[in-house]
Amino acid sequence: MIKGFYENSKGKRYSIRTYEYVKSDDNGNWTERKMFKNDTLRQKHVRTITYHE
């Protein structure tokens, strides 16, 4: 899990985003993750990576 926060120009935090990495491929790159904003699930990202030799 990775957490990050966003703040305005006066330094007040207005959002905390957390990324949970659910799945990864054999090369260690994430293929599925969830993004939470203030502990509420907001997005689910799924990606496919093609490797060329």
Image (tube, rainbow, N blue to C red):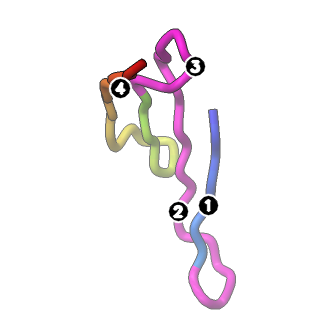
| Eye-nearest disc, 4 or 2 | 4
Q: Tell me which numbered mark, 1 or 3, is placed earlier along the sequence.
A: 1
- Residue beneath label 3, please? 28
Q: What span is colored magenta in the figure?
A: 8-32
How far is disc 1 from disc 3 in space, using C-alphas? 25 Å
| Pointer 4 or 3: first along the chain | 3
Q: Where is residue 5 drawn, in percent x and y? A: 61, 61
Q: What main secondary structure does the magenta stretch of the protein show?
A: strand
Is 25 part of what is drawn in magenta? yes
- Marks 4 and 1 close (CB-CB < 8 Å): no
Q: Nearer the viewer, residue 46 or 48?
A: 48
> Is residue 35 shown above or below 21?
below
Residue at (55, 43) in percent of width and height: 18
Name the residue carrying label 2: 15
Q: Secondary structure at mark 4?
A: loop
Give the mark, 4 or 2, whose residue is nearer the N terminus: 2
Q: Residue 31's spot in the image, x, y percent?
A: 41, 23
- Report which residue position mark 4 lands on: 49
- Point out residue 9 in the picture as x, y percentages from the top left corner: 60, 89
Image marks 4 and 3: residues in contact by CB distance under 8 Å: no
For this view, does 51 lie left or right of residue 19? left
- Name the residue carrying label 1: 5
The answer to whether marks 1 and 2 mark residues whose Cβ atoms lie closer than 8 Å is yes
Task: Look at the numbered disc 2 and give the secondary structure of its residue.
Answer: strand
Q: Dot 1: what SS?
A: strand
- Residue type at mark 3 is Gly
